[in-house]
Amino acid sequence: MIDQTIFKNKTAAYFTLGCKLNFAETSAIGRQLLHAGVTRTRRGQQADICVINTCSVTELADKKGRQTIRKVIQEHPEAFIVVTGCYAQLKPEDVAGIDGVDLVLGAEQKLDVVKYLDDLHKKEKGEVIISKTHRIRSFVPSVSADDRTRYFLKVQDGCDYFCSFCTIPFARGRSRNGSIVDLVRQAEQVVEEGGKEIVLTGVNIGDFGHSTKESFLDLLSALDHVEGIERFRISSIEPNLLSDEIIDFVAASKRFAPHFHMPLQAGSDAVLKLMKRRYDTALFRHKVEKIKTILPHAFIGVDVIVGVRGETDAYFEESKAFIQSLDISQLHVFTYSERPGTQALQIDYVVDPKMKHARSKTLLDISDDKLLRFYESQRGIARKVLFEHTKRGDKMHGFTENYVKLYTHYDQSIVNKISDVIVGDYDEERMCMKAEF
């Protein structure tokens, strides 16, 4: 039993790296510590506890994790340092070996952090508390608000796919999810806090229902009835799990935005096989065409990885041509990073770093062109925009239901409210469209 008097008058600072799922989980950790009596550190204040939630999706993410840990220790030398997240799960001893780290928590432990803070005395060497990922079965729902207006609701965690390039199943464990009843209750709590938009997040959200014998479509249907939420958005979903029924549902729903994000990763069937993806380019094209047929103004974002092992020049050209042929809105381009323990390391053909950079630039140029074309296609159309708190100079920004970024003169009265606007001209400097009232 933890003596919670140790938390009296204590403050904590939180540092999050990586995906929106991590941000949602850090928020849950913060709420747990607040319930125990630990308040959030004010700007410039020395913290008693520092929690660092790390990412490990690439080698660069690992490097950023180490840099952040050392910087936090330098800025808060007397604080009890807790490191968690994917980097901590995958390389706990490396993290524990960093001078100043006191506690390393794994994927299963991080959302029960109070349980492991039996005292707040600095350690000579970091203590490691980790579960083997194949034993992780617990799911702890979490929701966070970003510094704008939208909330991120964690509905699923873990992955069973074991793609050849990816370490996520080793970092987060097997696929599991919350119950629809609990997730609807969390969405209702967002309404009570004044939230207007919720993004559904997870590692592989289309696999929702794996542990509760429910379905992702069932979840969407239940959330669509939550009064007070203006919009829901579906974050990245595997194309093989984005069923035609889900697309039809979004088209007919009251609250789900016409906004989709799918990982393609490669536009070559040969490379998709090397990556051990569960779809081919024909299925991906069908999903894009299905969306555009019934939701012609829908925003479609697509993830692509360049320079994976096995991606020859010919395969890249094939991938580029396929991507150019798709009626999509934007690419998120990632450069392949080799991860220890992945099956991809067994593939002989290695892409030169300079070639990776060149391929990335090629696809980013395609993305810029597609985004501008999509934005221009929206000019003169009446849309609903949710303006955000952030003020940049005398301007504010927001997004339409189909994810067109708009700007206008700052007006506190329209923050976090849905406003009817006409999409105006494109501003090249701001890389967004003007909102006309």
Image (cartoon, rainbow, N blue to C red):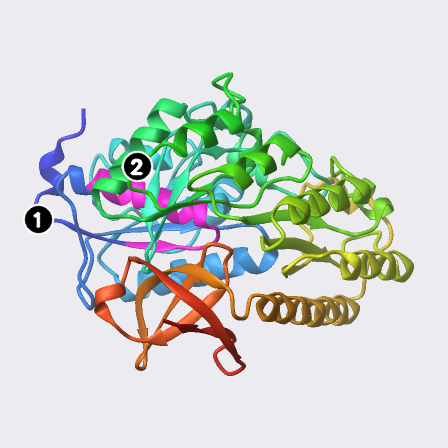
From this viewpoint, is residue 126 visible? no
347 and 163: which one is in front?
163
User: In the rendered view of the protein, which quadrant contains the N terminus?
Assistant: top left
* Mark 1 vs 2, N-terminal side: 1
289 and 157: which one is in front?
289
Q: In the rendered image, which residue does mark 1 sit on? A: 9
Where residue 114 appears, as percent x and y from the top left, is 24, 35
- Label 1's element? loop
Residue 320 falls left or right of residue 13:
right
Where residue 125 appears, as percent x and y from the top left, is 36, 46
User: In the rendered view of the protein, which quadrant contains the C terminus?
Assistant: bottom left
Give above or below for 356 relative to 300: below
**Residue located at (59% from left, 41% from top):** 237
Q: Which amino acid does label 1 sit on?
A: Asn
**Residue located at (25% from left, 37% from top):** 189
Q: In the rendered image, which residue does mark 2 sit on? A: 227
- Label 2's element? loop
Secondary structure mostly seen in magenta is: helix
Residue stretch in magenta:
14-33
Q: Which mark is residue 141?
A: none
Where residue 317 appears, as percent x and y from the top left, is 86, 62
